[in-house]
Amino acid sequence: MSPYLLGIDSGNTSTKAVVFDEEGYERGVGSVNNKQVNPQPRWVEQDMNTVWENTQTAVREAILAAKIDGGEISAVGMSGHGDGIYLVDENGESVRAGIQSMDTRAHKLLTRWDEAGVSDKVLEFNGQRPFAALPPVLLAWFKENQPEVLEQTRWAVYVKDWLRYKLTGEFATDPSEASSGFTDVRTQDYSEEAFSLYDLEEVRGMLPPIVGCTEMVGEVTKEAAQLTGLKAGTPVAAGAHDVDCSSVGVGCMKPGDLTLIAGTWSINEVVNDEPTFVEGVACRNFVEPGLYLNMSASPTSATNLEWFVQRMCPMEVKASKEIGASPFAFINREVEGVINEEPRVFYHPFLYSSPHGDDASGGFFGLRGWHTRGHVLRALLEGTVFNHKTHVDLLRGAFDVKRIRLTGGGSGSEVWSQMFADALNETVEVTGAGETGALGAALCAGVGIGVYASLNDATANVVRKFRIHEPDTRNSERYVGAYETYMGLVDALDPVWPRLG
């Protein structure tokens, strides 16, 4: 048996494939940007066939970069952005574009659920209050607005499950994904109560069977092998939601371990060994049976920086492409030049939604004529950190947090990572893996074929600390006042946001 494992992680912004050796080192990476489509305000979609094509390309690139033959890969693990919905017909074809987790088309339906007490009842059995991109909310929206879509649907799945089907021809999901709306948090299995409460009895047969995250769902088909460069017959594991895979990838596996994911979403999650119901926190199944991942999140993190650079810094993006460098390389330099200046500019990172309601929108505050792009970028970085802090403070009030590890795009910046440590006034660890979601998926596959005895055994052998950021006392004290101002702006704008549209 060869020591190579492949992790596929299809997020909201890109699909990545990474070849790992059994010690967890990256041997080859392939990445393709996913094309977001916004046909109407609040709609955030991607073409399902295009994301499959992106996966094919990413896998071929990863195998090429690893300088191996596809037949040397022993198993494949899957990860992807959670929530949203991908609808498939009886012939295994997409019914329509896939809906991503930043979509808020169903916000009015959700408001009705809140007013009617449905959301309260969902919290009692599902462990979370519904939000606009939760699968049951979207399926109810289709039933109400486009019933013909549901009539064409045989399977309602998540992005990673769609891609695994394209690899193996088999439909399934895992406990972490299944818990986003239709499961009883106590049994960790599908709940009969869910279908009647949502008035979605017709959806019951559309949900795929649940299999363990480390279990093998199928094997790479001959057709998929020709498209990806993998060997036909290579086993493919169920995998997990990318937030769970990232927690595995950084070694946060025990109660009290808190993972910060600074990616498209601001993900803040702590492992616990019993179901806990906290307002503003989603209690979902973790990768290990009997454990739970308690998550407070909003689509408000590093996606703000990507938006700013792509839309506001075209010259830097163009120059970076010409030399093959990162378009974000200039940011640390500009921010470091103004890092200690006061008074600061403030930023609300609410481009797609917020923990303060769907009406909230992004904005810069305190701008003056003498401010530079560096001041604006600093505000953007700090604003995303403050939003994480809003979520983390909620978790720290409910759980005994023992360790914090940071991953996602934000962890690549030492300046940004230090901001997390200072604003949270906590030690923040960054591990050596660059693609922690793909690593977690690969480790699930490794356990499934016996490379590792368990996920705990896997993380103990492959996860390594890379940097440790201790809070700077002076900066932490200054961030206390800055965060109060940030939240004061949130409170002041609350009655204004609905009028902004």
Image (cartoon, rainbow, N blue to C red):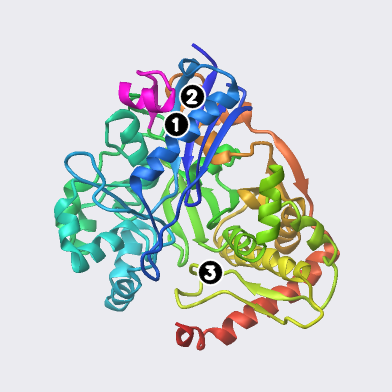
Name the mark on residue 351: 3
Give whichever of discs 3 and 1 has the lower sequence position: 1
Q: Quadrant of residue 115?
A: bottom left
In the picture as drawn, the residue positioned furthest to the top comes out as: 1
Q: Amino acid at mark 1?
A: Gly
The Cα atoms of the two marked residues, 3 and 2, are separated by: 38 Å
Residue shown at 51% from the left, 60% from the top: 296
- Which of the image's four quarters has the C terminus? bottom left
Q: Amino acid at mark 3?
A: Leu
Instruction: Tell me if residue 231 is in the magenta stretch.
Output: yes
Chain part drawn in magenta: 222-237
> Residue 234, position in %: x, y?
39, 20
> Residue 190, position in %: x, y?
26, 48
Q: Tell me if label 2 and label 1 are in contact, CB under 8 Å.
A: yes
Residue shown at 41% from the left, 41% from the top: 290
Q: Which structural element holds mark 3?
A: loop
Q: Which structural element holds mark 1?
A: strand
The residue wearing badge 2 is: 446
